[in-house]
Amino acid sequence: MDKPINKEDLQLSAYDYDLPKELIATRPVEGRHHSRLLVYNCQTDTVSHHTFNELVNFLPQETTLVLNQSKVFPCRLKGKKETGGSIEVFFLTVEPNKDGLYRALVKANGKKKAGDIYHFEDGLTIEINGNIEGEFLIRPSLIGNDLINYLNAHALVPIPPYIRGGESDEQDKKDYQTVFANELGSVAAPTAGLHFTDELLSKIKEEGHDIAKVTLHVGLGTFAPVKVDNLEDHKMHSENYCVDKSDFEKIKNAKKRFAVGTTSLRTLETIWQAGVENYTPGELKDTDIFLHPGVDVKSIDGLITNFHLPKSTLLMLVSALIGREKTLELYDIAVKEKYRFFSYGDAMLILR
């Protein structure tokens, strides 16, 4: 059910803020759980500053943390055209369709048309089959696990354009992946999960909390800017999600549910809004849910999330929980305290 909303909360311009460039993290801190953690308690309206390793001190008794276990695959592949020019293929899907074709973005000089063939290291070829709304259907000479093994050896993981201009390297294959990533399929990391180490997860369990996992494969649309002035006119991208039976039971019966990241929250809230009893565990479904002020978020008691871009749907999601003005107030505090922002940056814990 929606809540009453201030008209200004629906204006894109109301989600802008100033961020010094030096606060945009270009690499993660040494030791993932040594990143900083801003804690906001909604009940007491108080802010405190900590390291992520202290997270367990703020979890209510018998909390279930919900993690997104989707794994980023190295999907940026550079090669040559038959004419000798450079080419980059950005795979959007890790699984082929029934015709053995993959969705991709293709960057190359000149017109790209069906029948074009591109050459890559160690003999891989990719043929363009057609295009749909700016995306291409391509046919690689390898498919399935053979293609995945090839991409692991030759391609780079995608990083957002606001980190080093989007130019990733081998180090990002490790850095831009959660330690619990298990289900291959994302083109962007669920970044709130990057702060966790195996050591911290063990500590959380030892304190009597539980871990549940969902899978939501993050698509390229997560980087797409909002292009409308009124948020009610914005159309969210669609992404696939799935929750298996044992994890679903943990989540459904949890005393307290804390979402780790916006993707975990979007998964949970999609299920809650449709009726928890209506979800069939293990079923692959899709969601285009857009959480912003006016939407009553019912599924969680807390959220762990990074600091997000101005005017982004992720910033609007945080505002759905605590209000736009409070969100921007906390971001102002984070800037003054020199927190590191965006995917490789620090985190915020919201206690509802």
Image (spheres, rainbow, N blue to C red):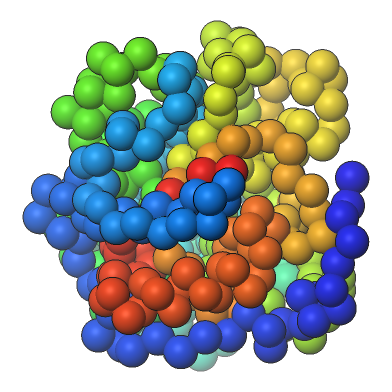
Image quarter (top left, top right, bottom left or bottom right) of the C terminus: top right
Residue at position x 59%, y 68% in the image? 326
Which residue is located at x 54 percent, y 40 percent? 302
Q: Quadrant of residue 84?
A: bottom left
Q: Is residue 183 left or right of residue 13?
A: left
Looking at this view, name the residue that lies furthest to the front: 44
Is residue 298 placed above or below 225 in the rendered structure? Answer: above
Work out whether 203 lies above or below 8: above
State whether residue 264 appears in this view.
no
Q: Position of residue 194 (x, y in %)?
A: 31, 47
Location of the N terminus by quadrant is top right
Q: Nearer the viewer, residue 218 or 335?
A: 335
Q: Is residue 317 left or right of residue 303?
A: right
Q: Is residue 204 above or below residue 133?
A: above
Residue 122 appears at what percent x and percent y? 21, 53
Residue 55 at least partly seen = yes
Closer to us: 347 or 104: 347
Task: Pinpoint residue 295: horizontal percent, then vertical percent.
Answer: 80, 54
Q: Residue at x 23, y 23 (%)?
A: 203
For the residue pair 107 and 51, the one nearer the viewer reads as 51
Q: What's the residue at 22%, 51% (across, down)?
A: 51
The location of residue 210, given as percent across then percent down, is 42, 17
Write down the quadrant of residue 187 in the picture: bottom left
